[in-house]
Image (cartoon, rainbow, N blue to C red):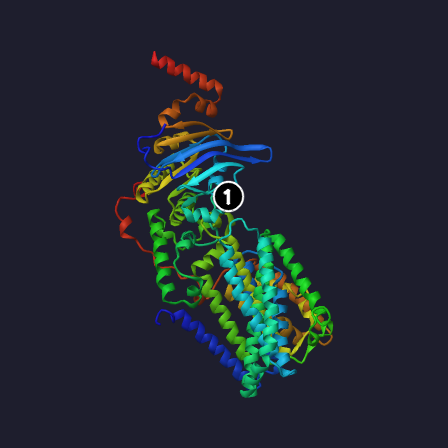
Amino acid sequence: MTSPKSTAATEPLLKVQDLSKNFGGLRAVNRINLELYPGDLAGLIGPNGAGKTTAFNLVTGVYQPTEGKISFKGQEIAGIAPHLINQMGIARTFQNIRLFPSLTVLENVCIAYHSHAGYSMQDAILRNKNFEVKEKELLEKAQDFLSIFHLEDRQSEIARNLPYGEQRRLEIARALAANPQLLLLDEPAAGMNPNESLALMELIHFIRDRFKLTILLIEHQMRVVMGVCEKITVMDFGEVIAYGAPQEIQSNPRVVEAYLGRGAAELSEKLQRSKAQ
Amino acid sequence: MKNIFSKSTLWFLGSAFLIYAVLQILVSAEILNSFWNTIIRIGGVMAIVSIGLNLIYGFNGQFSLGQWGFYAIGAYAAADVTYRWQINKSADGMVVLALATLLSGFAILWLRKRLSTVRGLDPLSAFTIYLAVTIILSALAWWLGTLISPTVTNGLNLLPAAVAMQIVFVSGVVFGAVVAAEISFLFGLPILSLGSDYFGIATLGFSIIIKILLDNSDTLLGFQEMKGARGMVGIPKETSLFWVFIFLVLVVVITRNLLRSSYGRAVISVREDEIAAKAMGIDIAEYKILAFVLGSFFAGLAGGLYAHINGFLHPNTFNFIKSFDPMIIIVFGGLGSISGTVFAAFAWALILEGVLRLFLPQGFETWRFVVYPILLLITMLLRPKGIFGDYEIPFLRQVLPKIRKTSETKGTDSPLEAHP
């Protein structure tokens, strides 16, 4: 099932084993397994309520898993505080945008860069040389991130006042500023028109190559992921129901069933059979 | 050095000094009588305590009603130090307080580094460890302090009386503030994990506890000189306009330097969105504690200064109704605006205690508590974000660098170029 890129020699960057999460009597995520290799651009898809976002929240430490293991760069991270997981190199965006709404665009990015600020609180209060140099560096770095997303002219605007598409881009810029190795994007194209989501997917490709990232993105519109992801995991009712390259996924009867219902699945099978004949 | 004194800094320090100089001349020439002099100093004190609260509520987003309790702690601690020097002719108060705060302060800092590496330590256990260490070290400081205080007293007596008094006064105010900060650390450790509203109620409880303890300070706490509910008298009146201004400028500069740095942005991010802050690598517990301790430190400073204005302290000054005063000031001046807070604090003192007291007809003085809420109502209706909103004078603003087009994205390598 592994794609040609990830040879057996490389260690997986993120390895999720038998991960489960219960909310009271509801099993939101049921024994899922997931492996991401350095440089992967993978998709996690599934209908609404399949448990995709819960899986993200488990990996980033927002929720504690009920069972299972999550290892990142060979280290066990289940149960670690979210800010430490972020500092280890996992950054994320949110499905419903969570910017720091009343701060400026530049400050939003600066906050994510905080753990790399390089000066102490005493330096900040005394405003010494170290502060001056490092703060200038920090601000310039933040501006660089903004200009990758073409937001450099917007730096002094209040984040809340940005148009929707730019808020989405700012959130990705902010996640990148945390200097991650693994970037988790939760429905980055939600609410975008087809042109915008196409541009966004190209952008995601670009930042993956530019920052040597591994990216996992959630999407529930199949069309969007098919074009950009190299590997796709499909979830339904808290379980992984399929895994593979986009073409394999598209023709997988269980996936079609999950999305469109049993009747459609049977129909598509019939169609394929007739095509083969 | 050129960087440090930018134009806005010079403007700020220059105008602060100018205001001080003008006021000092007016006071010295007795154009402003002692009534107005007191009101100006009260305004400065309120500005300091309100900046502390603005740091906690306005910038960090934690609704706290405990500020007044820390103000009371600072006031009584500093008053006790100067009282013992003035009346008992002994520096034991100062020595014990300084030793206790320094020992427990360093112990807390040291422990914090050690305990942060322990995984899965819950706040209550951490709290117990800190509390035990602080109590043991305070007892040690008591014993050590009474041992060396005669030497310190003799040493201070060698200096001119006025200089010795100033030394005792300033160290009383500063160490009183450190006591407030350390207590706020211990108190905040278990409490700050509560959500914002619950935290507000818990801190209100703290204010009430402090008030009750002060009511019984002579019996329950064993400080005879505090005289419990009868009120503490005989505190030297050492808070001059000069000290109020020095401390106010220091507090403003420290607050600004902290807030306009990466640490300050981390503090503010907690207010904006805790979940997003966590996901961006911000240790929100750490920054809640930081804002709370620093805010309480400022409250303690203000308390120490307040105690030496009238030379009289009464537990009723610190009841919980009064604890809304700094809250009113920061909402009135603008949550998250330092300049608004300073302005509102002086306006509050001048209007409530000055103008209204003077211009309301004889026998109607208590009506100022009717007039001033009406003023508040009108302001809130006309300017719901406070008088200053989030406006800051240039010195206090976050300086954003110039917009830069970096060469690396100038080319066509960013795909957004193709889809503008």
Question: For the point 69% across and 77% down, which residue is it?
Answer: B225
> Which is more toward the observer, A70 or B319?
A70
Q: Is residue B16 left or right of residue A39?
A: right
Q: Secondary structure at mark 1?
A: loop
Is disc 1 surrounded by few (<14), some (14 to 19) or many (20+) residues within 10 Å? Answer: some
> Dot 1 corresponds to which residue?
A79
Question: For the point 56% across and 69% down, which residue is it?
Answer: B101
> Residue A206 location, x and y as percent?
32, 41
| Picture quadrant where residue B323 is located | bottom right
Q: For the C terminus of chain B, which image quadrant? A: top left
Question: For the point 50% across and 62% down, which residue is it?
Answer: B110
> Residue A230 location, x and y as percent?
35, 32
Q: For the N terminus of chain B, which image quadrant? A: bottom left
Seen in the picture, residue B306 relative to B190 is either above or below; the reply is below
Question: For the point 36% across and 66% down, which residue is it?
Answer: A129
Chain letter of the residue beneath label 1 in the structure image: A
Seen in the picture, residue A71 relative to A232 is either above or below; the reply is below
Q: Is residue A125 left or right of residue B29?
A: left
Report the amino acid beneath label 1: Gly
